[in-house]
Amino acid sequence: MKVTDLDPSRIPNHIAIILDGNGRWAKKRGLPRTYGHRKGAFNLRDIALLCDKINIKYLTVYCFSTENWKRPKDEVDYLFNQPIKYFKRYRKRIENSNIRIKFIGRRDRFSDEFLNWVNIIEESTSTHKGLVLTIACDYGSYEEITHAVKEIALEVKEGKINPESINEDLIANHLYTADYLPLDLLIRTSGEIRISNFMLWQMAYSELYFTDTYWPDFNEDELCKALDNYAKRDRRFGGLKEAKK
């Protein structure tokens, strides 16, 4: 199945993907886990280009969680050093694309070099009009919501807002995804059926799709399967639709 086979009127505006299975993909082939992460990074490029091609507005991917610091140091070091090499090598191609790249999550634990490249990539693609590719790095939904609550509490303390005015919209506007369209579809690869502290607020009424395919093998056909499945969903957002007479 190709993206050209999809119904353009049923394409979601915003999808999120938990990129899972890189290490197991590599282990299955007798390769180091880091090779799986490398393969996964290039696959992200391919999937982002496909999403941009079919006019998906936002693609948010879970690359490194606030809990992933518990992983072996050599793997963590690779996960933060390899993107720098990628950015350096493909900088012109990234800047000449139509895709805007943003990062969400904590930034106080990044190395100076990694943070510098984050800022460079965000700034150099800030005027791009195509897909917004958001990389969730050192991200956790608990941390995101806690951060939002602290900001709101400070604004209440400073008299900027009245506690009675706190509602769902106000909270949403203090999240990392404040200016994003609602999340329509959440995909998780590798066969795991859990959310893992990812976009808990944003996914309240999103559709969920789980696949056994490891992320490095999640290709155009697999993306189309997920989008075709989404297109057949009956989204009611807690309500009921009147039966056709």
Image (cartoon, rainbow, N blue to C red):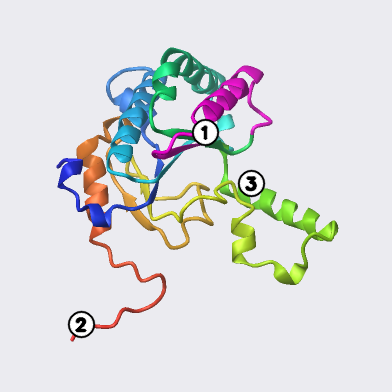
Give 91 or 77, whichever is nearer the viewer.
Answer: 91
| Residue 244 image label | 2
The quadrant where residue 192 appears: top left
Alpha-carbon span between mark 3 and mark 2: 45 Å
Q: From the viewer's perspective, is residue 4 above or below residue 45? A: below
The quadrant where residue 71 appears: top right
Q: Secondary structure at mark 1?
A: loop
Residue matched to label 1? 126
Asked whether residue 17 is in view, the answer is yes
Q: Is 87 one of the magenta-colored residues?
A: no
Q: In the picture provided, is 89 more to the left or to the right than 178?
A: left
Q: From the viewer's perspective, is residue 188 above or below residue 49? A: below
Placement of the C terminus among the 4 image quadrants: bottom left
Q: Which residue is depicted at the point 53% across and 48% down?
A: 197
Q: Which residue is depicted at the point 43% across and 17% down?
A: 92
Give 80 or 126, whichever is nearer the viewer.
Answer: 126
Q: Amino acid at mark 1?
A: Ser
Q: How many numbered circles does the render carry? A: 3
Image coordinates of residue 87 in percent, x first then y, are 47, 18
Image coordinates of residue 48 in percent, x first then y, are 35, 35
Q: Amino acid at mark 3?
A: Glu
| Residue 143 image label | 3
Alpha-carbon span between mark 3 and mark 1: 25 Å
What residue span does the magenta drawing correspond to? 107-135
Q: Is 126 one of the magenta-colored residues?
A: yes
Q: Secondary structure at mark 3?
A: helix
Q: Which residue is depicted at the point 29% across and 45% down?
A: 211
Image coordinates of residue 174 in percent, x first then y, are 64, 53
Specify few, some or many for label 1: CA neighbours under 10 Å numbering under 14, 14-19, or 20 or more.
some
Q: Amino acid at mark 2?
A: Lys
Q: Which residue is depicted at the point 43% across and 63% down?
A: 205
